Image: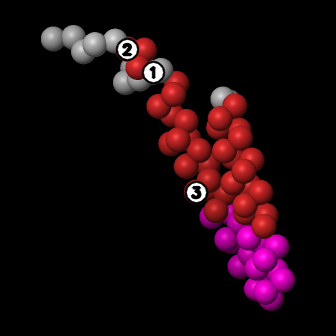
Amino acid sequence: MSSSFGVYLVGFIILVIGLALGAHLAGVPSMWIAVGVICLIGIGILSAVKKTQGRAGGPSGPASGPPRV
């Protein structure tokens, strides 16, 4: 796990906790808060992978060199 992935994910989890706490204080039922948290964590993981995927230097990354003809 790269450090940028971890930092992105930790920040997103802090955001989700804040939103869940706000929803709890607003009187939203716990079941719907749980559903929202699960969905947001899934979105956060997908976003973190997408943001950090290009930095790995895979076949399509900057380490592959010029295209061959």
Render colour scheme: secondary structure
Rendered residue at 66%/44% (across/down): 8
Disc 1 residue type (three-letter)? Gly
Rendered residue at 82%/80% (across/down): 24
Q: Is residue 41 above or below residue 6?
A: below
**Residue 48 percent coordinates (x, y):** 59, 44
Rendered residue at 69%/54% (across/down): 12
Does the magenta run of residues contain 6?
A: no
Give the side of residue 63 with respect to residue 2, left or right. Answer: left
Mark 2 sits on what residue?
64
Mark 3 sits on what residue?
43
The image quadrant that residue 67 belongs to is: top left
Labels 3 and 1: the sequence-earlier one: 3
| Quadrant for the N terminus in the image | top right
Task: Specify whether residue 31 is in view.
Answer: no
Disc 3 residue type (three-letter)? Ile
Alpha carbon separation for disc pair 3 and 2? 29 Å
Which region of the structure is painted magenta?
Answer: 19-39
Alpha carbon separation for disc pair 1 and 2? 7 Å
- The one of 66 and 59 positioned closer to us in this rendering: 66
Q: Secondary structure at mark 2?
A: helix
Whether the residues at callouts 1 and 2 have beta carbons within 8 Å, the answer is yes
Q: Secondary structure at mark 3?
A: helix
Residue 58's disc is 1
Looking at the image, is mark 3 or mark 2 nearer the viewer? 2
Residue 34's disc is none
Does the magenta run of residues contain 29?
A: yes
Alpha-carbon neighbours of circle 3 within 10 Å: few (<14), some, or many (≥20)?
Answer: few
